[in-house]
Amino acid sequence: MIRLEDILKYEKYLIEKRRYIHQHPESGFDVHNTAKLVANELKNFGFQVYEGVGISSVIGVLKGTQSKKVIGLRADMDALNMNEENESISYKSCVPGKMHACGHDTHTAMLLAACHYFKDHKDQIKGTLKVIFQAAEEGPYPGGGKLVIESGLLDDVDEFYAMHITNTIPVGKMTIKYGEAMAASDQFTIEIIGKGGHAAYPHLAVDPIVISAQVILGLQTLISRILDPTNHGVITIGVVEAGTAFNIIPNKAILKGTLRTLNEIDRAHMFQKIEDVTNHICQIYDATYEFKIGVGYPPLINHEQTSAFYQSVIEQSLGSDAFIPNNKPSMGGEDFAYYIKKAKGTLAWLGGRNEELGYIYDNHHPRFDIDEKALIKGTLVHINTVLEFFGSVK
């Protein structure tokens, strides 16, 4: 177990890389410049490098001695398609319409800094370290994680670990939700097909707008009266499309929404109930419908054993007061779920919030930014996770 003072010499490198990536964001699978930067750094650090994995992700492999154990650390590289509103920072995005508003620039930089450490201390790798720099965590579907797993390059990994920056907890603190941690992030589209007509004579038409309103309200009741109240779920309709004029009843209306659930049983059950509600309401009004599911990321379920191990590493690295117990799952989605369906593993959250300095905006906000003092602490946890996994340093 190494100490923070042992790695302070990497902090300048860490912040420089984070700010460069923040200033030059790329989104989706189109992260080729970021991926090239990562690949070049890994090659300089002595890693075997696989580029273009699952379209544009990068995997680095560093093999040590003595053990057949394999650990995987994952960071995501992609930004969001939105404009940054942080006017006062020197490293503001210089790409219109793109911003690292979810902190993936910090994830990439922390893992690169950890790799820099292992370049200088390869003798501490008592097995195989695989680092994954992933594209398209924010989409588009099917996301980068699924394609990376399907590449087969990680089939031998025993355990996976990742961390995600957040401004919901103070700078340098960390937390883990054991078990059901993040939701499946599925989509659906409902097209309600009625019969158009004159707005003054609704009895001669089948009004898909009124039917849509009934469906929307009916779907909300599913959460409160069908889903087990001790479980968590969300149904949100984000898009309603219908009509062309105030005095015309249109032929159809389109609803687009998301379903968030924390386990596969609720996931399947709620999709069936969404269609049941739509079907029954349409029958009442003599309408028809088309129902399409866009299957998103699976629920992220942190394994108990790896979560306990990760918590221990955090507490030994940063102090027992740095770990914040967490019994509240997030209804956001994360395609790290694919990794820990493949092998056991855990995702933790790293705090970047500093109210005194104004780092208060949550992920996906146009003014999101973090206190960079968190980054060297996250890097320390990455390094000690690897060392403790291999039993390298006592």
Image (spheres, rainbow, N blue to C red):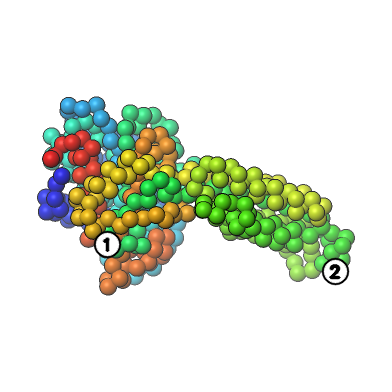
Crowding at label 2, few (<14), some or many (≥20) Cα neighbours within 10 Å? few
- Quarter residue 224 falls in: bottom right
Residue to which mark 1 is pinned: 171
Tell me if 125 is positioned left or right of 231 in this view: left
Whole-angstrom CA distance, mark 2 to mark 1, is: 60 Å
Q: Quadrant of the N terminus?
A: top left
Q: Earlier in the sequence, mark 2 or mark 1?
A: 1
Q: Where is 152 relative to 20, above or below?
A: above
User: Could you say where residue 287 lies in the image, as x and y percent from the top left?
Assistant: 79, 52
- Give the amino acid at mark 2: Ala
- Quarter residue 242 falls in: bottom right
User: Could you say where residue 277 lies in the image, as x and y percent from the top left?
Assistant: 70, 51
From the viewer's side, name the closer residue of 11 and 330.
330
Please give the count of numbered marks on the rendered protein: 2
Residue drawn at (79%, 60%) of the image:
207
Residue drawn at (37%, 66%) of the image:
361
Q: What element carries label 1?
A: loop
Q: Which mark is residue 277?
A: none
Residue to which mark 2 is pinned: 200
Q: In which quarter of the image is the C terminus?
A: top left
- Give the amino acid at mark 1: Val
From the viewer's side, name the closer residue of 309 and 246.
309
Label 2 vs label 1, nearer the camera: 1
Tell me if 166 is positioned left or right of 315 in this view: right
Q: Where is 88 relative to 229, above or below?
A: below
User: Could you say where residue 302 lies in the image, as x and y percent from the top left?
Assistant: 38, 44
| Residue 112 visible, this orientation | no
